[in-house]
Image (spheres, rainbow, N blue to C red):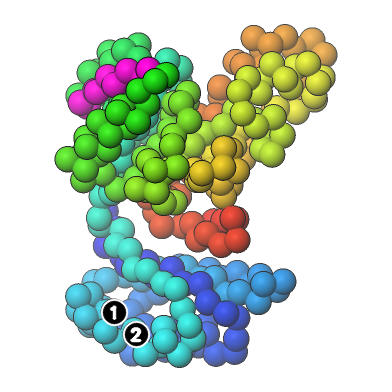
Amino acid sequence: MKNTAILLISCPDQRGLVATIAEFLYRHNANILHADQHQDAELKLFLMRVEWDLADFQLDLDAFSQHFAPIAERFEMDWRLALSGNRPKLAIFVSRYDHCLADLLYRHQAGELHCDIPLIVSNHTDTRWLAEAHNIPFQHIAIHKDAKAEAEKDQLALLRHEHVDFIVLARYMQVLSPEFIRHYPNRIINIHHSFLPAFHGAKPYHRAFERGVKLIGATSHYVTEVLDDGPIIEQDVARISHRDQIGDLIQKGADLEKIVLSRAVRWHIESRILLYANKTVVFD
């Protein structure tokens, strides 16, 4: 198990940023393990992720904010500190399709996802057996057309009770309300079964088949109030041909969905993502 700290920074691009950050960490005996940065020339924006070993770090992390504040103010930084030893709490929302849920639960059991999963929420009972097989509490909350707000209140109450940090929509076939999303800004990850921005919304495989595309894809993104328009985290594609029918597209797409979603979830847990201008930077 790693015992590291991760500093994520975004600020106006200017001289001396890397040197100042490195000098600050060196002064407190940090052993930097990874450092990655990106400059957006058009927006004149600097983004950075730096990770260091805490074994010999000589600054109390409770005092980190106080000591780093002068640098943050000088360079007008938005920043946050994360610890690799922390295990964020993840709630998974799912409907009837179980392939993404099964993949996430397997990866969690295998130790690939360093988080806790205290809750699986579904508007159907089809995946209850899968939750029970992994000893994870399953909550069925039916969604009725005229009572979606009440259902979301019940969901939010469960999330608060379990102190959930972020949510993954593992083929959850319901549109979340703006009010719900505002409770978890940039903390809801969705998998869409299309290479966005193509074929957003419902039944993208059917529309891709009708259009005769030669590539299908999957997209994992953060959820915003605009449907399928949030910052994209990861995408992948598979080649198809005129011989493939709708069922073939769905089968091939399911494999893409699993791996694209698992990558996005892992990168979120590992604090590798910075958001800006409705885009993401995913650091190595």
Q: Are marks 1 and 2 in contact (CB under 8 Å)?
A: yes
Per the rendered image, the range of residues in magenta is 136-144
**Percent position of residue 237, x then y:** 68, 33
Which secondary structure, mark 1? helix
- What residue do we see at 31% from left, 36% from top? 91
**Percent position of residue 53, x then y:** 31, 70
Residue closer to the observer: 114 or 32: 114
* Within-10-Å neighbours for mark 2: few <14, some 14–19, many 20+: few
The residue to which callout 1 is attached is 65
- What residue do we see at 46% from left, 26% from top? 174
Q: Amino acid at mark 2?
A: Ala
Instruction: Please tell me the numbered disc located at residue 69.
Output: 2
Which secondary structure, mark 2? helix
Residue 105 appears in which quarter of the rendering?
top left
- What residue do we see at 45% from left, 20% from top? 99
* Residue 180 sits above or below residue 26 on the image: above
